[in-house]
Amino acid sequence: MTDLAAEGDVDDAPTGPSSSIVSGTRHRDALRLLFILAGGGHETTTAIDAEVTHVFQSEKRLMAIDFLVRYPDYLADALLDQFEASGNSDLIDAADRIFIDDEPSVRTVSMVRWHFGAYQKIESALATLHAYGFVRPMKLVKDGENRRYDYYLYPKAFAFLETAVIQVPALAWYRDRVALAIRVAAAKSGSELKGWQYDHEEYSNTPRGGVIPSIAVKVKARLDKLKEAR
């Protein structure tokens, strides 16, 4: 198995100046993004490379789903939104599990708010995925002005992730978490997902360049109230 999976553990992000730590963080980010691209992509026959089988559309949507993976408390809040709309008990149970496992404390990977919301430089991670032959980022121009980044996936990306989970079972958390985040995102566009983020006062009031704070206390109170009413 490549170093990408070996260094892509689910521990908290390492910090410090050494090149080995920086490499490990980059590989973890690359793995997380690959799980999202694979989980949220759909089959395509229109790619310019005949070997491509799937495409994930929109960098904005990629960043919005990544935010849900990195902030378990916001994901739990989105699950509760869907529970109130549908009454599906699986949704509130999934939100409850996030707090039972103390994920807002041990799984959060913070993001900075920038010009258009939660931001993380992903160029290095995408370059890593491209170097391994998993993903090909593309920039499409639509209507002459509106630009959208799409990401084309090769079959070896899916084979790699399947093998990685077998060889490093802890990586199954990423696979399962991405599936849950994709369930929340459903057919929403990146702009719609970003709009939902801004509906949270803590998020929208974060100063530019500031770290987006947790909403765990508020979401846990909401969860407990909904559980009592069941």
Image (cartoon, rainbow, N blue to C red):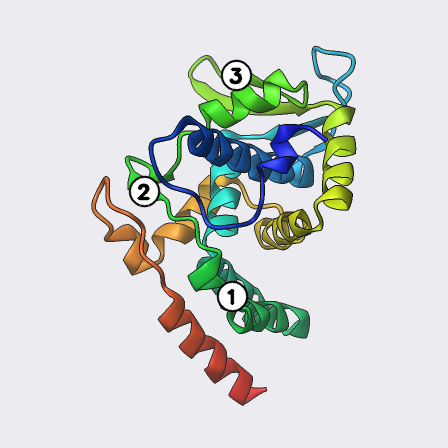
Measured along the vertical axis of the image, is residue 61 above or below residue 135? below
Question: Which of the pair 162/47 is nearer the observer?
Answer: 162
Q: Which mark is residue 112?
A: 2
Q: From mark 1 to mark 2, how far is it between C-alphas? A: 24 Å
Q: Is residue 70 left or right of residue 209?
A: right
Disc 3 target residue: 139
Kindly identify the amino acid type of the residue bearing the numbered disc 3: Lys
Kindly identify the amino acid type of the residue bearing the numbered disc 1: Asp
Q: Is residue 40 left or right of residue 142?
A: right
The image shows residue 148 at horizontal and vertical percentages of 50, 23
Q: Is residue 163 left or right of residue 109?
A: right
Question: Decide: marks 3, 2 in contact (CB < 8 A)?
Answer: no
Task: Using a 10 Å C-alpha cutoff, classify the residue at mark 1 as few (fewer than 14 neighbours), some (14 to 19) or many (20 or more).
Answer: some
Q: From mark 3 to mark 2, how far is it between C-alphas? A: 24 Å
User: Mark 1, mark 2: which one is toward the viewer?
Assistant: 2
Question: Which of the pair 131/46 is nearer the observer?
Answer: 131
Q: What residue appears at the point 58 percent right and 39 percent down from the top-left corner? A: 8
Q: Is residue 33 left or right of residue 197?
A: right
SS for tag 2?
A: strand
The image shows residue 83 at horizontal and vertical percentages of 58, 70
Q: What residue appears at the point 79 percent right and 32 percent down from the top-left corner? A: 159
The image shows residue 34 at horizontal and vertical percentages of 62, 34
